[in-house]
Every structure is written in structure tokens, then in C-alpha cells.
Amino acid sequence: MKDMYKPELTVSDRDGIIPVDFFDVLVNRYFPILSCTYVATVIGLALKKGGGVYFLDYFLRDKSIYWLALIVAGWVSIPAVIWIFMRGVGALEQFANNWYKSTTIMMVSILIGSFMLFPPSGQANIYWATVRLFIAAAIPVHVIQYWFFRHGGLETIQSTTLSAVALSLMMYGFFVL
């Protein structure tokens, strides 16, 4: 017989600190984008520095491209991590999508404004060149991340394979070089 003073609790998707779909969002949606960003940045920087002729040389011997790729991957993942945590908090779940869209719109506005205020031929171009590079690289990644987050990600086997490739490249950059 049930005790009247001890109501039976039911499990819901908001019980606990971590939401039920947190690992799905992390493994199948966030890690593939982060891994793809890292791998693409390493390959892109090796192509930029070495061209087609010395690509393999820079890819295998230049430690700076692995560090810069890590910085780029960290830069583009900051809003994604905040979006994941906002979705996890029940009161902020409704605002997570609007916040993410407004962050991307602000980045586009900053990029356009930097070209208008500081033209590429001006003296301030030295300082703004790197900032523009990071912002310009982050905007398409933000759009792809948002699409992945809202419409589902990769299958688990595909996302783990891509994450393993990125992790092995990162370990190669850390320990071998």
C-alpha cells in the first residue's frame, strides 16, 4: 500500500544536472563540428604555407599550424558550448536559439563594420587582419553548427571516426612535433 505522505516521483528529462539528450548533442552534433573545424584548419594552413608543392612538409613538420588550428577550434566552439549549456538550463532553453542567431549576426556586423571603419589599405589593417580572419572563419562554422544542433548531427560511428581523426592529428601536433 502506498504511503500518502510520500508521493511517488517520476523521472523527467529535466531531472539531474545533465539533460537526457546532452550526450547526443555532445557526441553526434558538437564533436563532429569541432573535429571538422580542427582538421580543415590544419589542412588549410598547411596548404596556405606550403602550397601544393610543400604541403606535406608543412603538414608533417610545422607545429605552429597545429596550435593555430587548436585556437581556431576553441574560438568557434565558445558560442556552441554556451548554447549547449543554455539548452540544459530549463529557464534559458527558449532563448538559446535566439541568442545563438544574435551572436552570429553580431559577428557579421563586426566584420562589416571593421571593413568600413578600418579599410584594408589603412594603418590599422595590421591589427585587424587577424581579427577579421578569425571572425570570417567563424561565421560559416556558426551557421553549420546551428544547422547541426537544430536538425541532428551525424551518426555515432561517423562522429566518432571524425573525432578520432581530429584527436590523432591533435596528439601528433602535441607529442610528435
Image (spheres, rainbow, N blue to C red):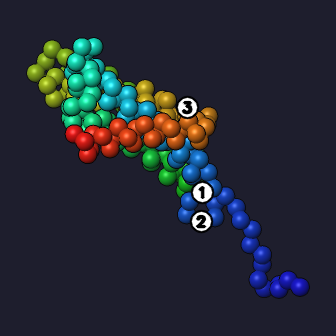
Answer with the quarter of the image where residue 171 lies: top left
Image quarter of the C terminus: top left
Compared with 85, 5 (above or below) is below
Relative image position of residue 82 (x, y in whole percent): 45, 48
Q: Which mark is residue 19?
A: 1
User: In the figure, is residue 135 to the left or right of 119?
Assistant: right
Decide: few, some or many residues near mark 2? Use Cα within 10 Å; few <14, some 14-19, many ≥20: few
Answer with the quarter of the image where residue 142 lies: top left
Q: Would you name the residue on which mark 3 appears?
A: 147
**C-beta proximity under 8 Å, tags 1 and 2:** yes
Please tell me whether mark 3 sits on a helix, a strand or a loop. helix
Q: Residue at x 63, y 64 (%)?
A: 15
Q: Would you name the residue on which mark 2 appears?
A: 16
Label 3 vs label 1: CA separation? 20 Å
Please tell me whether mark 2 sits on a helix, a strand or a loop. loop
Relative image position of residue 168 (x, y in whole percent): 38, 41
Compared with 79, 107 (above or below) is above
Residue type marked 3 = Trp
